[in-house]
Amino acid sequence: MNAAVIGIGYWGPNLIRNFLASPNINKVYVFDLNASRLDFIRKKFQEVIIADSDEAIFGNPDINIIAISTPVDTHFELAKKALEKGKHVWVEKPYTSSTEQAEILNRLAAEKKLNIFVDHTFIYTGAIRKMKELIDSGELGDILYFDSVRINLGLFQSDVNVIWDLAPHDLSIMFYLMNKKPTAITANGIANYYGHENVAHISVYFDNNCFSHFHVNWTSPVKIRRMIVGGTKKMLVFDDMENFEKIKVYDSGIEMKEKEGIYNALVQYRIGDMYSPKLVQTEALALAVEEFISSIKENRKPLTNGDDGLNVVRILEASDISIKQQGKLINL
């Protein structure tokens, strides 16, 4: 197959590199409106074919895959055009600007029997795969809560707020790990710069007394990338800033024992051993590319598909409604 990448800003070169490295890709085409970026790519990746317009990409019958790495407000039109031209589509996060756009793309892909891959890259990391394995095995027991912090100083986006920029990573991980359908959300935050919220908190509610919380911030003096998953048996911590022992599993928990009625309940804290499992070190984006190509060959949906993109966008869209009303509960 042959692939094309439209948009070669921050993430585009990584896509080019991994498509070029794939044994299943013969040629990689590139287009961007910025001529200086095209000159940079031409020097960095001499194998790529530079297109002189986006029409040269969409109209080329030799191109099977079009990867869209442009601002989110352009995703829908570009992806729709690619699908209409019979191309499989790779879209960066967040998938679209609205749930309506995501639903239109998903229906169009189904009608044309084409695949949509949404680049929720973290799903392909060794750490998240290991977390999924531990949860699915029952080692943690029933999941009680999912708590995530993704904060740092910069990088401000001019087109979206901090939720749309940072939260898609962790929302996609939440859906992948928990396999539960959210029932409602609330969002709170404040905009200190450019009219977009730069600090925000999202609470996601599920049935069975389960809860998720997300803290995202562009204006933190420290960089934190941490998740805590609490279960009835064990708990785990994922710290992406750690070079070693990114995941730690704690044999810790709380036990409630009644003594002469509920009002005299005893709370006992159980603190046991901790261990750090070994993780697969293969680059996540390389695995993502191969998963997309395999899904096309096998005529199946990829692991991170348009439905997953829609689930995340639905939360993002609801958070916009809630945050403008100072944390109003939005039913999903």
Image (tube, rainbow, N blue to C red):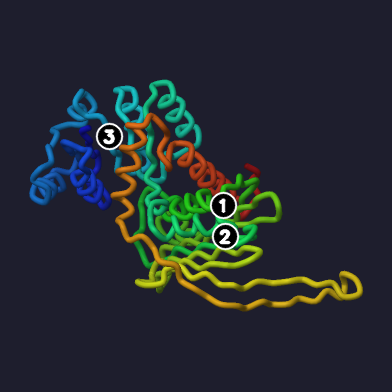
> Circle 2: is it few (<14), some (14-19), or many (20+) Cα within 10 Å?
many
Give coordinates of residue 105: x percent, y percent. 42, 29
Seen from the viewer's position, the closer of residues 163 and 59 is 59
In percent of the image, x 20 and y 30: which residue is there? 57
Give coordinates of residue 128: x percent, y percent. 44, 57
Instruction: Determine which residue is flagged by label 1.
Output: 178
**Residue farthest toward the right in the current orientation of the protein:** 260
Measured in 3D between alpha carbons, the distance from the residue under mark 1 to the one under mark 3, in whole angstroms, is 31 Å
In percent of the image, x 30 and y 43: which residue is there? 290
In the figure, is residue 145 to the left or right of 197?
A: right
Residue 29 shows up from this direction: no
- Rendered view: 331 above or below 80: below
Mark 1 or 3: in front is 1
Q: Amino acid at mark 2?
A: Phe
Instruction: Determine which residue is flagged by label 3.
Output: 66
> Circle 3: is it few (<14), some (14-19), or many (20+) Cα within 10 Å?
many
Tell whether label 2 touches label 3 (CB within 8 Å).
Answer: no
Measured in 3D between alpha carbons, the distance from the residue under mark 3 to the one under mark 2, in whole angstroms, is 34 Å
Q: Amino acid at mark 1?
A: Met
Give coordinates of residue 226: x percent, y percent. 47, 66
Tell whether label 1 touches label 2 (CB within 8 Å).
Answer: yes
First in sequence, mark 3 or 2: give its number. 3
Mark 2 or 1: in front is 1
Element on which disc 2 rests: strand
> Circle 1: is it few (<14), some (14-19), or many (20+) Cα within 10 Å?
some
Q: Which mark is residue 146?
A: 2
First in sequence, mark 2 or 1: give its number. 2
Element on which disc 3 rests: strand
